[in-house]
C-alpha cells in the first residue's frame, strides 16, 4: 500500500497534506528508501531486518531448545514465556509505537479464552456449544477484535493516566461480570478441560508440540509487528505518538489510527489468549483479575516497550522469577519480589532490560574508542 493511498484512506475532511517531492512519506519527512526518521531512529532500511545474523542465531537456539531441555523447561518455561510474551507484545505495540498504555490486554486475551471454551468443547458441556475447534477459534478472535475496537474507541479520546484508568475499569468490570455470571461464563469456577485439538495424530498439549505451536504464532505476531511499524500506517502511528497535534494538522485522522491500532493489538492479544487457555487447560475469572492485568504491564516494562522483542524478554524474566523465586522466598511473597524488580528497572532503566543492554554497549564502545 502506498503512502498516498493510506493518506487518502485515513484522512478526514478535505484537507490534504502536501508533499513537494515523491520521496516524502506520510510523515512528510521519510521516504521508503530513507532509513531514518527525524529523530535519527532507523525505521526503514531492509524490509526484513529481523533476518540479521543475531536473529538467526536466536532462532536456531529456539528451535533446538526443546530437544536439549527437560519437559518442564520446555512447557513450563519456554511455552509459558511465548504465551505471555505474545499477550505482552500487544501492549508493547500500543505503548511503544502508539503511545497508548492499556491495561485491558489481558482482559481481551481472557475474553478470547472464554469464547474458545463457550463455543468449543470443555468439561462444562452444559454451557459449551461443541463447535469445531477452527470455528470456535475464529469466532473467539473475531470477538477479541470487536472488544478491542470498542475499548479503543472508548479510551483513545483520553490520554495518559485517564487512558490507563479507563482500560483498567473495563478489565475490572469484565472480571466481576465473568465471576458473577453462571449461565454463560460458569461463574467463579470457570471452564475446565479446555484442550487443543488432536490434529495429524499429534497431541498438541504435549510439551514439545505445544512449544512449537507457541513458537510459530509468536514468530508470526512478532514478524507482523516488525512489518507493520514500517508501513505507512505504522509510521503515521509513531508520528501520532510523538506529536498528535501536528499529525492532526497535517490531515491525519488521529482517532481512526489509534482505534485501528487497538484492533490490531486485540488480534495479537486474542492469539495469545487462545494459546493461554490451551496452556492452562482452563479459563476462570482468576485468569483475568487485576493481578493478571498488572502482570502484563510488568512484563512489557521489564523487557522494554521501545522494541517488540522486549515483550518476550520481559516474559522470560517474569516466568523465571515466578518459578524459581519461591525457592528463595515464600510463594506468598512473589508479588513483593516482582514488585522490587519492577521498581529497580523503572528507577535505573525506564527502557527496561533492553535499555540497560543498550547503555552497556554504548559504554563499552566508548571505552574502546578511547583506547
Image: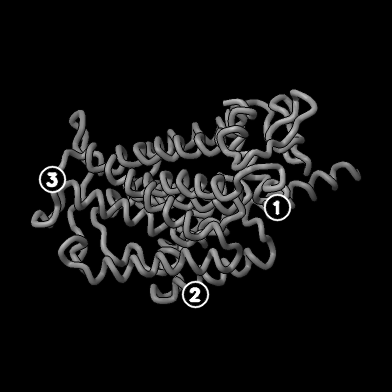
Please, is residue 27 above or below residue 169 in the view?
A: above
Report, in whole angstroms, how far the alpha carbon at label 2 lies from the one at label 3.
Answer: 42 Å
The residue at 68%/35% (across/down) is 26
Whether residue 138 is visible here, answered yes or no, is yes
Q: Which tag is nearer the camera, tag 2 or tag 3?
A: 3
Please state if 287 lies on the left or on the right of 29 as rendered.
Answer: left
Location of the C terminus by quadrant is top right
Please, is residue 362 above or below residue 232 in the view?
A: below
- Which residue occupies the foreground of this view, 246 or 32? 246
Mark 2 or mark 3: name the one nearer the start of the chain: 3
Whether residue 231 is visible here, answered yes or no, is no
Residue position marked by numbered label 3 in the rendering: 130
Please, is residue 141 above or below residue 320 in the view?
A: above
- How crowded pointer 2 is (Cα within 10 Å; few <14, some 14-19, many 20+) is rated as few
Disc on res. 336: 2
Q: Which tag is nearer the camera, tag 1 or tag 3?
A: 1
Residue position marked by numbered label 1 in the rendering: 245
The residue at 35%/63% (across/down) is 288
Residue 352 at what x, y percent from top left?
62, 57
Amino acid at each position: 500500500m502506498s503512502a498516498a493511498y493510506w493518506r487518502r484512506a485515513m484522512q478526514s475532511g478535505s484537507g490534504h497534506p502536501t508533499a513537494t517531492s515523491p520521496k516524502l512519506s506520510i510523515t512528510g519527512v521519510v521516504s521508503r528508501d530513507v532509513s531514518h526518521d527525524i529523530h535519527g531512529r532507523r525505521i526503514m532500511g531492509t524490509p526484513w531486518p529481523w533476518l540479521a545474523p543475531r536473529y538467526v542465531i536466536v532462532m536456531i537456539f529456539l528451535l533446538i531448545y526443546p530437544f536439549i531441555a527437560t519437559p518442564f523447561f520446555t512447557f513450563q518455561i519456554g511455552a509459558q514465556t511465548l504465551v505471555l510474551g505474545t499477550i505482552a507484545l500487544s501492549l508493547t505495540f500500543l505503548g511503544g509505537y502508539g503511545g497508548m498504555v492499556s491495561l485491558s490486554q489481558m482482559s481481551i486475551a481472557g475474553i478470547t479464552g472464554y469464547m474458545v471454551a463457550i463455543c468449543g468443547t470443555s468439561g462444562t458441556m452444559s454451557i459449551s456449544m461443541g463447535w469445531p475447534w477452527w470455528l470456535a477459534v475464529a469466532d473467539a478472535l473475531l470477538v477479541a477484535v470487536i472488544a478491542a475496537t470498542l475499548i479503543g474507541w472508548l479510551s483513545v479520546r483520553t490520554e495518559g493516566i485517564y487512558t490507563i484508568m479507563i482500560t483498567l475499569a473495563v478489565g475490572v468490570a469484565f472480571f466481576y461480570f465473568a465471576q458473577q455470571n453462571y449461565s454463560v461464563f460458569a461463574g467463579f469456577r470457570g471452564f475446565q478441560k479446555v484442550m487443543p485439538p488432536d490434529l495429524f495424530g499429534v497431541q498438541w498439549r504435549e510439551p514439545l508440540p505445544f512449544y512449537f505451536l507457541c513458537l510459530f504464532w509468536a514468530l508470526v505476531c512478532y514478524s507482523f509487528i516488525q512489518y507493520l511499524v514500517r508501513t505507512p500506517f505504522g509510521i503515521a502511528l509513531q508520528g501520532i505518538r510523538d506529536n498528535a497535534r501536528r499529525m492532526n494538522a497535517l490531515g491525519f485522522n488521529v482517532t481512526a489510527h489509534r482505534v485501528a491500532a487497538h484492533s490490531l493489538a486485540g488480534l495479537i492479544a486474542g492469539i495469545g489468549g487462545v494459546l493461554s487457555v490451551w496452556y492452562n487447560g482452563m479459563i476462570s475469572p482468576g485468569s483475568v483479575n487485576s493481578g493478571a492485568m498488572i502482570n502484563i504491564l510488568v512484563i512489557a516494562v521489564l523487557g522494554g516497550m521501545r522494541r517488540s522483542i522486549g515483550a518476550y524478554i520481559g516474559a522470560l524474566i517474569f516466568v523465571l522469577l515466578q518459578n524459581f523465586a519461591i525457592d528463595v522466598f515464600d510463594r506468598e511473597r512473589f508479588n513483593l519480589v516482582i514488585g522490587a524488580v519492577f521498581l529497580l528497572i523503572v528507577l535505573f532503566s525506564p527502557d527496561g532490560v533492553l535499555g540497560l543492554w543498550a547503555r552497556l554497549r554504548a559504554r563499552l564502545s566508548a571505552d574502546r574508542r578511547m583506547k
